[in-house]
Amino acid sequence: MISSAIIFSALELGFIYALVALALFLSFRVLNIADMTTDGAFTLGCAVSATFAVAGHPLLGIPAAMLAGACAGGVTAFLQTKLNIPSILAGIITNTGLYTVNLAVMGFSSNVNMMRADTLFSLLQPVLGKTFGKIIPVALIALLTGLLLALFLKTRIGLSIRATGDNPDMVRASSINTGFTITVGLCISNSLTALSGAVLAQYQKTADINLGTGMVIIGLASLIIGETLMPKGKTWVKILGAIAGSVVYRFIIAIALRLDLPSECLKLISAVIVALAIGLPAIQAGLKPKTSQGGK
């Protein structure tokens, strides 16, 4: 039997990690770039948010983390667009460098404890109450971010980013600077990833250097689950699907934990979910009965 506490926890974490799914939606689905900066950018958001919270500025830590994430995305974009480094390799290079940067932000400590510090949630708890003091803020952040992303993709620069992902050669022929659109897209994408890390750090009142490990898989799992659940449609439907997929993914993890599966197996479960979701069309095609060419 799943208790209400587990349900609330799954919903809260689902909305927090939905920001990573939205980030990957922008980079992976819209820009058609496999951005490997995600893990490091997530940890960077955790580190910056925790550092500001310990210093007594938890609210300021949220936009500061987003700015730091945008800078990380800018570095990846620079490596890709100016130095002509392949996108995957550019993300790996940035992600590797971010490990040292994240340690430096946390004072060269592997973790930061915020048990005695105020956080976004502790400040809102007297207003929203203990029961809804966490789920309401994270739900609003996820839904508002999704709404702003949908509106952004309808602007001129947003349409240029979408066109760059669909057909970069045609975009160049239209005298649009693809380097600029890629840079803007990756900066926004990694700022959303860092926002997720910033909220998570204040949610659990701790930041760890390894918090971002495997975040690409978690985000992709959420994104692909959402695409499976939601029918193909307009951009806002896909964005809503990414948020819903993240929540469903957290419920799957919660059920796995209730089955007493070791926590070390969660990454394996995530990998299996992603593999099955991506391979679902091929599996369905293989299960369909083959019709004979004679027309019988």
Image (tube, rainbow, N blue to C red):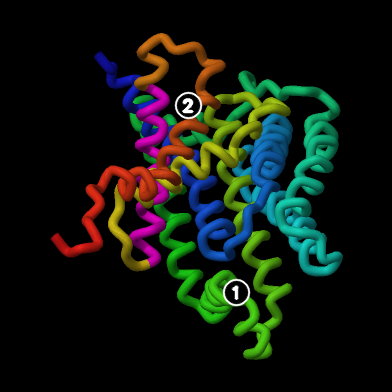
Counting from the top left corner in percent of width and height, residue 170 is at: 60, 84
State the residue lying farthest toward the top: 260
- The amino acid type found where label 2 is placed reads Ile
In-front residue for pair 285/107: 285
Q: In this view, does 226 lie above or below 116?
A: below
**Is residue 58 or residue 17 the one in the foreground?**
17
Is residue 222 visible from the viewing direction of this image? yes
**Residue 228 image point, x, y percent:** 34, 48
Marks 1 & 2, CB-CB < 8 Å contact: no
Nearer to me, 34 or 51: 34
Residue 69 left/right relative to 227: right
Q: Mark 1 points at which residue?
A: 164
Q: Does the magenta stretch include residue 179?
A: no
Q: What span is in magenta?
A: 235-254
Residue in the image at 37% along x and 63% along y: 236
Taking the image as drawn, is residue 137 in sight? no
Q: Mark 2 points at which residue?
A: 269
Is disc 2 surrounded by few (<14), some (14 to 19) or many (20+) residues within 10 Å?
some
Mark positioned earlier in the residue sequence (1 or 2):
1
**What is the crowding at mark 1: few (fewer than 14 residues within 10 Å), some, or many (at least 20)?**
many
SS state under label 1: helix
